[in-house]
Image (cartoon, grey):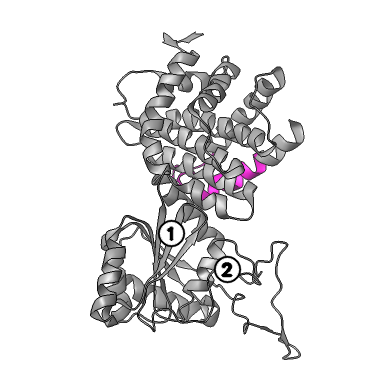
Amino acid sequence: MTINNINLNEEAIARKVEQLLIEYNAKIYNYLNIVITGKPFSGKSSFLNALFDYPKKEPKFKIGTGYGIKQDVYFQRIGEHIQVWDTPILQNLDVPNFIKAQENFQKSIDIGIIVVQGYPDQQQIENYNLLKKRAEHIFIILNKIDQYSKVNLQVIKHQWREALNLKVYMSIHEVCCLGYDPQNKLLDPITGEKKEIIVDEYGIPQTLKGITEVKNQIFEACFKVGKVAFLARELKQKQPHAMGIIAAACVTSVGSIFLPGSIAIIGASQVSAISSLGYLYRGEFPCKKEITQAMNTFSTTSSSSIGAIAYGIFVSFLPPTGVFDIAGIIIVVSYMATTLLIIDYFLSKGLKVDSSLKLTQEFNRINRRLNISIANAEIREISQMNFWIELLSQITINLGCNF
């Protein structure tokens, strides 16, 4: 098949996939390194348990131990590919432990997290400045928001922004991790009786607040460093986190709209997402042949649709020096999202992606809906994880019912 003088065949797709996988493979056979810092009893352990979906009765990170008081670096491995360091109070370390901490910080840190509470102090500011120098992506977590009034919460956030000299685009994430400490109870407002905290079907406290939002942002950061599969694999619920992988690919692609070489970023995002989805469900990455066959199926499936034109650009070997306009990003990203949604469906069912009339019809239905939804949204909206997760989750339900 040829579109706009571009050959769409399995050999061309295989060459493009191989080109993209060379760079991606260098990342996946590594570790996702996470460093979390903050004062003792700031809620670091509770936050990590919430982030990784650990049940209340089986927390991975011990609660109430006050790591940092002993001036040690607490290390924990999660699965095969995630390493977490819980840092001490850096400026109070003795010399041997300070050297140990410095060695940890010298390693590649993908995600840096600082958990703060209360008003700023010099100790936490220094922790932030040190972490900022080492981490690829950094997240500021204001914990225990249930302890503040709305007015005081905004005052505290403002003071933290000033103390840390944050840029306008940097966020302070408000969270409540109440529920992991065995001493945590709910107080009945009428009787004054202390009650146990209710958990959901996975044993996770229902008193958590703000965790989903910050998790989405961490997903996006992990996707950018090529390691989102490691995080998604260790979480309890597969389907919501599959949507997180696809949403991160879409956000990354939208973010490339004003950059030279947009198509290279989008192509890499698609291959990375397919590989990550495979790892999520199977615990191993799909081989090049499997990815190539899946992508070849969709290049044929959408041969009569506008999405195929975008795909033709993707597999072309023209130098990726162009910049997409908004209309172009709607075409390309909706095509990519449709492809990833259907691949996710097949993987979640343990099925092989195979071309059929029904697949073609479903592909075109989803692609049309995505085009409309994206076209009606502002560029600021389609750059957000929450927009994509909400949209993709709705479409996934329709796919499950109609496919």
For the C terminus, the quadrant is: top right
Q: Nearer the viewer, residue 332 or 317?
A: 317
Magenta residue span: 376-395
Which numbered mark, 1 or 2, is in the foreground of this view? 1
Q: Look at label 1 and name its amino acid.
A: Gln
Which residue is pictured at 36% across the width and 35% down the height?
23
Vertical arrangement, residue 248 with respect to residue 85, above or below:
above
| Mark 1: secondary structure | strand
**Residue 321 shown left or right of residue 45 in the figure:** left
| Mark 2: secondary structure | loop
Q: Which mark is residue 83?
A: 1
Q: Which mark is residue 209?
A: 2
Which residue is pictured at 40% across the width and 73% down the height?
157
Mark toward the start of the polypeptide (1 vs 2): 1
Residue 100 in which image quadrant: bottom left
**What is the spatial separation of the Cα atoms under label 1 and label 2, in whole angstroms?**
25 Å
Residue 117 included in the magenta stretch of the image? no
x and y percent of residue 268 in the render?
41, 33
| Farthest-out residue, front | 96
x and y percent of residue 136 in the render?
33, 54
Visible residue check, residue 325: no
Which residue is pictured at 57% across the width and 68% down the height?
209
Vertical arrangement, residue 154 with respect to residue 7, above or below:
below
Vertical arrangement, residue 328 with respect to residue 387, above or below:
above
How crowded pointer 1 is (Cα within 10 Å; few <14, some 14-19, many 20+) is rated as some
Q: Look at label 2 and name its amino acid.
A: Lys
x and y percent of residue 188 in the render?
72, 85
